[in-house]
Image (cartoon, rainbow, N blue to C red):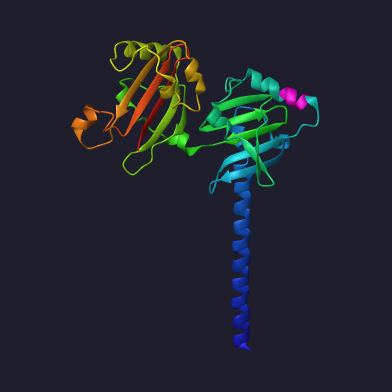
Amino acid sequence: MKNKKIILYILLVIAMCIVVSFLSIEITKLYFSINRDKDYKKLGLEIDEYDIEYCTIYTEDFLDGKYKVYKIKNYNTYIMDKFKSQLEESDLWDRNKYYEYIMQEFSEIKDDERIPIDREDLYYYNGNNAHAIFDLKNAKLYYYINRVFNNHTDYHKDLNIDTRNYISREIYDVRGGPQGDGTDYYVYKYTEEKGKEIIETLEQSSKWNKNRLDDDKLDAFKYNKEVLSIENGYYHYELVCRTSDENKKKNVTKENATGYEVAVYDYDKNILYYYWISI
């Protein structure tokens, strides 16, 4: 009889531990699900919980979402007019769209089919380590974080210009081979003041000149076809040799070249385009 009581006591303790563990897990999951779905509060808009009809999370880390879509409640015209006023008045949002590479990241998935974003009436946000789009027509808010954009370092001292202190930096490809091979492709946007400083440097550099490069070289900027129509720019092109032989590095020929780098600075818009490839 005594043994039965001990066994029942042990089973009761085990059962209680299981229940407590289960509740702890569920409470933790609920806590993170509630808090991780509030990234919209980081975007400088007056959005409250009751403005959100639902949130779809497509890609997520253990604790925080990387890509999610919020459906905004749209039960009368006042709602969208209210948000449109906020978007128009905000310094964080504007009508200038992202480069096409970034636009391709925004979509939804229905029945395993990727549906591109409707581009008719959009406002764009780029800040706080995130990209976001407010779709006024369909009352949706897209929120996207790309870790590469947050952590990329500057590789471009070879250009003989200071590429730091930019307004924004778009990264399309990052070299990742074991020997530093692969591709670097990114675009910097600068203030007018910083642009004047860069132009002064370019005018004195033997690596840069105003002679437009041939289209076959500029075609490297496949996500930025606006490069082909730049009216006032500085251009740089150079073969590269990824080798430990310092002599070959300094005297690159077509025969020993492993790749090339091409750069364009648009001094009307203060934008630097850079592409480097070596295989």
Judging depth in this view, the residue of 20 and 82 nearest the camera is 82
Q: What stretch is highlighted in magenta?
A: 78-82
Quadrant, the C terminus: top left
Query: In the image, what residue occupies the spot 40% across and 32% down?
Result: 184
233 relative to 14 in the view: left or right? left
* Residue 78 at least partly seen: yes
Q: Is residue 117 above or below residue 201?
A: below
How many labels, in total? 0
Lateral position of residue 29 relative to residue 237, left or right: right
**Res 164 visible:** no
Q: Is residue 113 left or right of residue 73?
A: left
| Residue in the image at 66% along x and 27% along y | 119
User: Looking at the image, which residue is at 61% across and 44% down?
Assistant: 58
Residue 118 in the image: state x and y as whole percent: 68, 30
Residue 232 image point, x, y percent: 44, 10
Residue 51 placement (x, y as % from top left): 72, 34
Secondary structure mainly formed by the magenta segment: helix
- Residue 258 part of the magenta segment: no
| The furthest residue to the left | 247
Residue furthest to the front in view is: 255
**154, above or below 208, in the image:** below
- In the image, farthest residue toward the right: 76
- Quarter of the image for the N terminus: give it: bottom right
Q: In which quarter of the image is residue 266?
A: top left
Quarter location, residue 270: top left
Residue 146, image x, y percentages: 51, 37
Q: Nearer the viewer, residue 159 or 32?
A: 159
In the image, residue 62 sits, relative to residue 53, either above or below, namely below
Image quadrant in which you'd find residue 124: top right
